[in-house]
Amino acid sequence: MPSHSLVVSTQTSHLSLLQAAGERLLPIKPLGIFVRRWPTILKTASQQDRYQLVVVGGGAAGVELAFAAQHAFATQQCQQASVTLVASESGILPGHARGVRHCARALLEQRGIKLLQAQAVATSEGIALSNGRSLFADCIIAATGARPPAWLRNSDLALDEQGCVIVDAHHRSTSHPNVFAAGDVCTRSDIQLAHSGVHAVLAGPVLAHYLIASINGHTLESYRPRKKSLYLLATGPKHAIASWGAFSAQGHWVWVWKNWIDRRFMHKYGTLNRGHKE
């Protein structure tokens, strides 16, 4: 390995069980392809009888996408379109408070989104479930979460069973101290840390500090992530669910809060991009 510090941060979507869907499959990553294909899906759904969209993945991304798709179909007058959310046997939103899961389930039923809990494998015409059922799908949105890139298994880096880089309290590889990693691509060796976009974003500035400090030969201080993280889940028509540890709330005011945070975040990076171009 080279003597200077490196960053491992790439990840890929977990699609191995859904590849058989072919053109029906729409992964959420890369985002650019998803954005380009979505208007075509809406147009087709508005013109076709009984258009069936299936979202596979019971995490925050899958739940939000199911709500967003149903809302888009309603506003675009896709009257014959339906949305089904397929989660694992453990249910939706694993790791979230019971109140959040209960609220999300109630809203799914209220919005007419069918929830199925089973392992999903794609077929040429839709989805085959581990409970023996088959489900036709015009489109399958894959929100099955991220996994580390396969090339890591051919490296000498210490990895966990999922292929994530094992890092210490400084987000430094336990086997190669000159390699740093953050986000879904890594696993902390000292604490249990959920794979979450919130943790990945917060670890970014910390990782940048570690890289500079390492290059300059400075001592690294341990990074202790927050024990609780704020999650704001959009549920469609200007409504959202808030989650903070065991606390949960829902309503229009939560959506206003989420909208303000998201727009501020995107504006910050949009300003940076405009400044770079100039």
Image: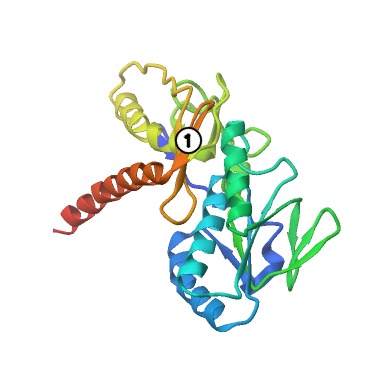
Q: Which residue is drawn at 52% across and 39% down?
A: 184
Residue 261, horizontal then vertical, whole percent: 32, 43
Residue 155 visible in the current orientation: no
Dot 1 crowding, Cα within 10 Å, few <14, some 14–19, many 20+: some
Residue 22, horizontal then vertical, whole percent: 66, 71
Quadrant position of the C terminus in the picture: bottom left
- Given residues 63 and 196, the one toward you in this image is 63
**Above-or-below relation of 270 to 163:** below
- Given residues 219 and 26, the one toward you in this image is 26
Q: What amino acid is at disc 1?
A: Ala
Q: Which residue is drawn at 47% across and 55% down?
A: 236
Q: Residue at x 44, y 24 (%)?
A: 225
- Given residues 166 and 2, the one toward you in this image is 166
Q: Which residue lies furthest to the bottom in this view?
A: 47
- Total of numbered circles in the picture? 1
Residue 52, horizontal then vertical, whole percent: 65, 71
- Given residues 225 and 162, the one toward you in this image is 225
Is residue 81 toward the left or the right of residue 31 in the image? Answer: right
**Above-or-below relation of 220 to 140:** above
Residue 20 visible in the current orientation: yes
Is residue 16 toward the left or the right of residue 213 in the image? Answer: right
Residue 157, horizontal then vertical, whole percent: 57, 34
Q: Residue furthest right?
A: 132
Q: In which quarter of the image is residue 16?
A: bottom right
Q: Residue at x 53, y 34 (%)?
A: 186
Colour pattern? rainbow
SS of the residue under disc 1: strand
For disc 1, the marked residue is 249
Is residue 240 toward the left or the right of residue 258 in the image? Answer: right
